[in-house]
């Protein structure tokens, strides 16, 4: 919201008469004082050799502490010298940032007598302590605060003023922490780079999932075939050194105050097949988000006039409405773009894939190096409570199938616009001013 708008809002009150100051400097100094802070951190070291996969969860990562509003989060893979690593060497399949909380008393007792047990126990504490986003998949599925993949260098995640993601206000007795899941595939020297990044089971020689359970015969690719320490097929005789890599991530935030207008995170998955038995009470467990799907090969001869376009759609009621502040899709290679439509067919947001054209990090040919984003003017794009929205995810299909692709849509929604929020949260302030006047 511009200072002018805020001025208009405030001048409705008698504040200006009381203070007798023009709507500028002193009164609004909060805007300049509450500067965006930026911190750059490295994840723990990721050791990876040609063809290998690393998919690990890193708990309690470096993160801003205290009651703050997140304003942005970006990341990229770097080597030990801090150089950006291109996607054709290390494919960043995805990273996801997950908020969780731990009871302070539990932490203390375990830590005091068995340091090993803490590691183990922390997993179950983590499971129960996930503070997921506002929806809309089942359980903790897609519950992350941020998370994208190869497009991370070229995708804007900044949250415009005066909006922010409120964090760092855990309940009494709890501590808030952050977990980073990083899934990277080293494709140096592999036989089929695209196949390795699409996690094709034959290239990984994988027939059982990471828990040893046989995969169904029709499962030809996806995350169940490229779990931690699996190995993608290398070109005959290829040898290369292991390398040490890091996810370098940049967090932006401001201190929390009443002028920050909170936004909620929603992630819609195009594979979600919601079972609605009683529309008045949709629960999280009615959703069935598979996260990944397959794009079938197209046959140019039989589909005349078809550009070999794969369009996948899902329609779901949006749980709680509000004003869209930011939107972006997540797709994999061959993705074209995705659109979220409102019930009346209006476009809520379209996000298109940007492909690289060169060799260098951030511009790798054949890879999605960015997704376009939507920043609607606050108030201009509204979703109403329970509105049925439709997500459409387009891929170009080719003579071979694409496995393990995704069609996600990430939305930040504000339930109040700045002036509404301001008046809700400043009533006590206005009362006090009134007391002074009277
Ligand atoms: C593939 O896996 C099977 C057993 O799971 C093993 O016998 C075979 O040697 C593996 N092939 C390669 C190329 O690693
Ligand atoms: C997806 O394909 C449909 C059908 O051709 C088209 O109407 C729509 O504009 C496409 N959307 C994007 C984002 O490319």
Image (tube, rainbow, N blue to C red):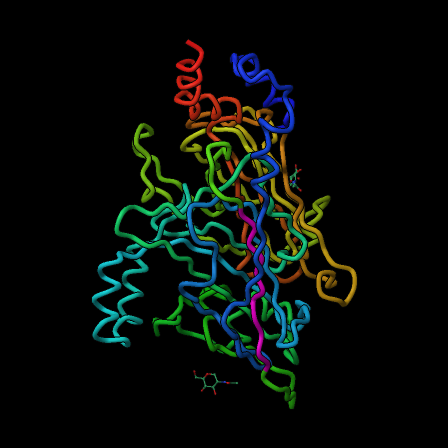
Horizontal relation, residue 181 to residue 21: left or right: left
The relative height of residue 332 versus residue 56 in the rendered view (above or below) is above
Could you tell me which quadrant the N terminus lies in? top right
Q: Nearer the viewer, residue 19 or 340?
A: 19
Inspect the magenta stretch and tell me whether residue 247 lies in it: yes
Give the magenta range: 243-253
Q: Nearer the viewer, residue 234 or 124?
A: 124
Q: Residue furthest top?
A: 438
Residue 65 picture location, percent across and down: 44, 53
Residue 266 picture location, percent across and down: 47, 41
Inspect the magenta stretch and tell me whether residue 245 lies in it: yes
Could you tell me which quadrant the C terminus lies in? top left
Horizontal relation, residue 241 to residue 137: left or right: right
Determine the residue positioned at 52% across, 60% down. Answer: 95
Residue 377 picture location, percent across and down: 63, 29
Horizontal relation, residue 412 to residue 370: left or right: left
Determine the residue positioned at 63% across, 56% down. Answer: 151
The quadrant holding residue 48 is bottom right
Residue 245 picture location, percent across and down: 58, 74
Determine the residue positioned at 49% across, 40% down. Answer: 314
């Amino acid at each position: 919201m511009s200072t002018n708008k805020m001025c208009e809002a405030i001048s409705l009150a008698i504040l200006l008469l009381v203070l007798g100051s023009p709507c500028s400097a002193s009164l609004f100094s909060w805007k300049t004082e509450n500067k965006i802070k930026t911190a750059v951190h490295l994840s723990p070291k990721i050791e990876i050799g040609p063809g290998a996969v690393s998919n690990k969860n890193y708990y309690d990562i470096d993160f801003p502490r205290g009651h703050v509003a997140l304003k942005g989060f970006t990341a990229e893979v770097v080597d030990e010298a801090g150089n950006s690593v291109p996607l054709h060497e290390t494919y960043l399949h995805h990273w996801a940032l997950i908020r969780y909380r731990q009871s302070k008393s539990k932490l203390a007792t375990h830590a005091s007598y068995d340091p090993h047990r803490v590691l183990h126990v922390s997993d179950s504490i983590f499971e129960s302590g996930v503070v997921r986003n506002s929806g809309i998949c089942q359980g903790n599925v897609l519950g992350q605060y941020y998370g994208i993949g190869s497009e991370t260098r070229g995708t804007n995640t900044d949250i415009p003023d005066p909006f922010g993601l409120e964090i760092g206000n855990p309940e009494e007795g709890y501590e808030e922490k952050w977990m980073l899941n990083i899934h990277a595939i080293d494709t140096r020297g592999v036989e089929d780079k695209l196949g390795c990044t699409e996690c094709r089971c034959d290239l990984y020689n994988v027939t059982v999932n990471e828990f040893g359970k046989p995969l169904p015969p029709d499962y030809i690719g996806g995350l169940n075939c490229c779990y931690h320490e699996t190995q993608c097929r290398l070109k005959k005789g290829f040898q290369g050194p292991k390398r040490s890599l890091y996810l370098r991530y940049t967090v932006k935030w401001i201190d929390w105050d009443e002028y920050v207008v909170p936004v909620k995170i929603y992630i819609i998955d195009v594979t979600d097949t919601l079972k609605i038995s009683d529309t008045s009470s949709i629960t999280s467990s009615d959703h069935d988000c598979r996260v990944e799907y397959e794009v079938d090969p197209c046959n140019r001869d039989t589909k005349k006039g078809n550009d070999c376009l794969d369009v996948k759609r899902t329609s779901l009621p949006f749980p709680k409405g509000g004003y869209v502040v930011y939107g972006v899709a997540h797709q994999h290679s061959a993705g074209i773009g995705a659109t979220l439509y409102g019930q009346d067919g209006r476009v809520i947001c379209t996000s298109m894939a940007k492909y690289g054209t060169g060799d260098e990090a951030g511009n790798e040919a054949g890879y999605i190096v960015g997704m376009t984003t939507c920043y609607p003017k606050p108030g201009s794009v509204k979703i109403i409570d329970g509105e049925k929205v439709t997500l459409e995810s387009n891929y170009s299909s080719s003579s071979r199938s694409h496995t393990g692709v995704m069609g996600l849509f990430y939305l930040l929604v504000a339930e109040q616009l700045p002036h509404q929020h301001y008046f809700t949260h400043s009533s006590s302030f206005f009362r006090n001013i009134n007391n002074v006047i009277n």
